[in-house]
Amino acid sequence: MGTLNQLVIGASIGAVLLLAALGLTFTFGQMGVINMAHGEFIMAGAYTAYVLQPLAGDQAVLVALPVAFAVGGVLGLILERLIIRRFYGRPLDTLLLTFGISLILQQAARDIFGAPNVQVDAPGWLTGGVDLAGVRIAYNRLFILVLAIGCVVAISLYLSKLRQGRRMRAVMQNRQLAAVSGVATGRVDQATFFIGSGLAGVAGVALTLIGPVGPTFGTAYIVDAFLVVVAGGLGQLKGAVIAAFVLGVLNSFVEFWTANGASFAKVVVFAVIIAFLQVRPQGMFVLKSRALT
Amino acid sequence: MLEVKDLHVAYGRARVLFGVDLQAPPGSLVCLMGRNGVGKTTLLKAVMGVLPARQGTVLFDGRDITRAHVHARVRAGLGYVPQGHETFPQLTVAENLQVARESTPKARPGTLDEALDLFPALRGLLKRRAGFLSGGQQQQLAIARALVTEPRMLLLDEPTEGIQPSIVQEIEAAIRQLHATGLTILLVEQYLELALRLADHFVILDAGEVVRAGAATELHNDEGVRRLLAV
């Protein structure tokens, strides 16, 4: 019973990690851009739900999902066009710049919404939970899990079935070859950043279901999100999914087994990832070809 | 068709090309030769816009494309097969071709079939990831990928380098066939014998400058040329 309970909690934590990390599999994994402002795009998505609350009532979360995707996407696009595109191939400069942008966005949120946290009400149909084999699963956690799975399926279909997705994969694998194949790589970069940042917005809306929203809301997730992408293998959606759930379940079990709970679990998760990356620096999955294997 | 005038190219402070002039008339097959490191690949990259020109002009069909984006040059009719049988390794053979095909919105419907007719072996490999093809198959895919963009001129950078002999013959036959259809070709090739069989014009680079150019017939039994190409 305890094991099943921890597995369910772990899956729930994994879904949250995955949602926060999905956008980064695009911007960091596919483009190699270390965007420290990704957490603030999550925060912007969360505040989008808060802003829509007076209009949409307790359905704000649902209404906000597409709107937050657009808000996050546009913010990402502005960042890419104004700043990041001038710093491609300069990861440390990008890291520093986007860290500065994240501080500016946090302060902007403080100025607009105030420093105290605000609450987004969950829809009525997300209160309560379901009993599964004696384990209580909250509907809001279940919603996050379903949303994460839905996003993964949508991204997979986009990358494999659509022309734009194929171009994105081509640019990721060989930017110069994509250009000489006629692909306008600059436009693909814009689309990649829009989608990656839009997914951060969606994650922000979902995360309002498990906690209040504040100006530093996104920073709580940014490190974990990067860990998921690195452990899964850069640009590898499959790797990100597995890494998120493995880390979630590990976190859940360590919290359960130890008296010190959350803090100790974090230490153990970090230690495991460091050890894993020592053995396999490229992450779980890596691009394979005759030339690379 | 292609006219390069006084082209200077550098990698940072390292200058590689010093005022290169080159012409490829419509329907010609020009072979660009020279020892390793003389700037052949650099010249092709500069023509495609992958490397910026420090000075000079690149004219294609009389239009100055020196500052045009790479993808704009492809749409203008320049096709490029880089050195080293490059593909998108995680995409299937079909996807490799689709990416290039879809980037040329005005391409004719039969282009893909024509490219596959040239290399029939690829038909049976359409669902295989390009990274798992042999070097020769990857080179055939690389040429087919360039062809589906419907180029009017094809730049080939050492297409037979490191390829098994049987596929070298297929690639040579394909180049001959493409030339026969009227496609203008600029071929970088180290092997003089192959160049003699295919080219109707030649250009020899040495230390970033054109040192010899003329009709391919002039290459026969020219000891000066052999000295310029000797390692």
Image (tube, rainbow, N blue to C red):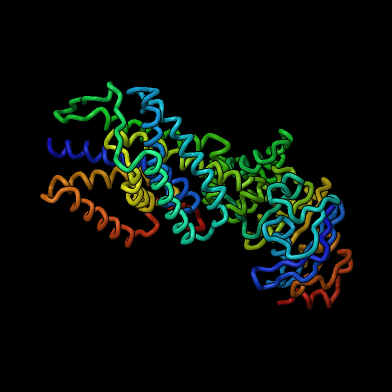
B225 in relation to A1, above or below: below
Going by the image, does B119 lie left or right of B23? left
Towards the viewer: A77 or A191: A77
Q: Number of labelled discs?
A: 0
Q: Position of residue B177 (x, y in %)?
A: 78, 48
Q: Position of residue A290 (x, y in %)?
A: 50, 55
Towards the viewer: B187 or A105: A105
Going by the image, does A185 lie left or right of A151? right
The answer to whether residue B28 is visible is yes
Q: Residue A112 occupies which quadrant of the picture?
A: top left
B161 in relation to B120, above or below: below
Considering every residue shown, the one lying at the far left of the view is A259
- Residue at image location 39% in from the left, 31% down from the top: A51
Towards the viewer: A73 or A240: A73
Q: Position of residue B117 (x, y in %)?
A: 70, 41
Going by the image, does A187 lie left or right of B67? left
- Residue at image location 45% in from the left, 35% down from the top: A69
Q: Position of residue B70 (x, y in %)?
A: 69, 51
- Residue at image location 53% in from the left, 44% down from the top: A78
Quadrant holding the N terminus of chain A: top left
Going by the image, does B44 lie left or right of A207? right
Q: Residue A146 occupies which quadrant of the picture?
A: top left
The answer to whether residue A237 is visible is no
- Residue at image location 27% in from the left, 47% down from the top: A247
